[in-house]
Image: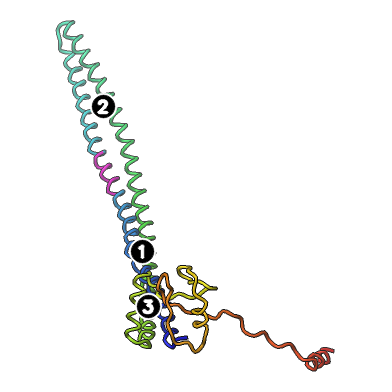
Amino acid sequence: MHPHLKYLIELQAVDLRLIEIRERLSRFPKRLAEVEARVTAARQQITAAKEALTSSLKERKTYEMDVEQWKERAKKYRNQSSEVKTNEAYKALQHEIQNAEGEVAKAEDRLLDRMVTGEEYERQVKAAEAAVKEIEAAANVERHAIQAEYNAAQKELATAEAVRAGAVAAVPADLIDHYERISKRHGGIALAEVHGEGCSQCGVHIRPHVIQQLQRAENEEFFHCETCTRILYYADHTPGPAPAAPSTAETSAASTRDS
């Protein structure tokens, strides 16, 4: 294996880790915005419920005045009926009294309906206020959790960047430039392990003599995939030697101890 290849393998591993950490960090503002949006929506429900209640109370006051006005009008007509001199005038006043009393009944119905509606709006305000308290408490817990995750991710980032600096320092600058040019073209993956007889990233077949060279411990050449141009490396996945079988003497000694 080329003496610098192990550092490039380490560099790629940490670069992929850095990509993952930075992507995670980029999601924190959105997560916080979602929390704030839930709180804002809950507060807006309180505002809407209170505005509806205020409007209902104004209408209730108007309907109360309507009831009183029609009652006063009916009372006035009754007082006048005792002073009239003719039958026709009396009948006319009775008609006005009946009309005023009808309007009183209608106004009272409207008032009762508005009172019931107002009670519902009061219930909605109380429910919205209770909901806001719960949502704000949950939001505070979530904010602290998100902040803790963010702080932990920042520490991970600092650690990974320090590891990367160490890996970069061990490799010549021109090789780092070469690595980073390939990395930018392939989403941070500049190296490809040989799996079987193919490139692990694009799957293209690797020439046998290239695989043989990569498998040689004394190899100091770089080889690239002919299709994706990534730097190839070969990792030895063969299992280590099996433990030796015990000798006959060891077996006999063990049997003597057991007996």
Residue at 34% from the left image edge and 72% from the top image edge: 184
Question: Where on the picture, by quarter, is residue 101?
Answer: top left
Q: Residues within 10 Å of mark 3 (few under 14, many from 20)?
A: few
Amino acid carrying label 1: it is: Asn
Q: Which of the marked residues, 2 or 1, is nearer the chain's N terminus? A: 2
Q: CA distance from mark 3 to mark 2?
A: 70 Å
Please identify the residue farthest to the top as the structure is shown.
87
Residue at 36% from the left image edge and 63% from the top image edge: 140
Q: Nearer the viewer, mark 1 or mark 3?
A: 3
Residue at 46% from the left image edge and 70% from the top image edge: 201
Give the x, y percent position of residue 118.
31, 39
Q: Which residue is mark 3?
A: 155
Up the image or down, 98 lies above or below 65; here it is above
Up the image or down, 78 lies above or below 200; here it is above
Question: Where on the picture, by quarter, is residue 109?
Answer: top left
Please identify the residue farthest to the right as the structure is shown.
259
SS of the residue under disc 2: helix
SS of the residue under disc 1: helix
Q: Which residue is mark 1?
A: 140
How many numbered discs, if any? Answer: 3
Q: Nearer the viewer, residue 41 or 256?
A: 256
Amino acid carrying label 3: it is: Lys
Q: Secondary structure of the magenta portion, mostly?
A: helix
Q: Is residue 148 visible?
A: no
Give the magenta range: 46-55
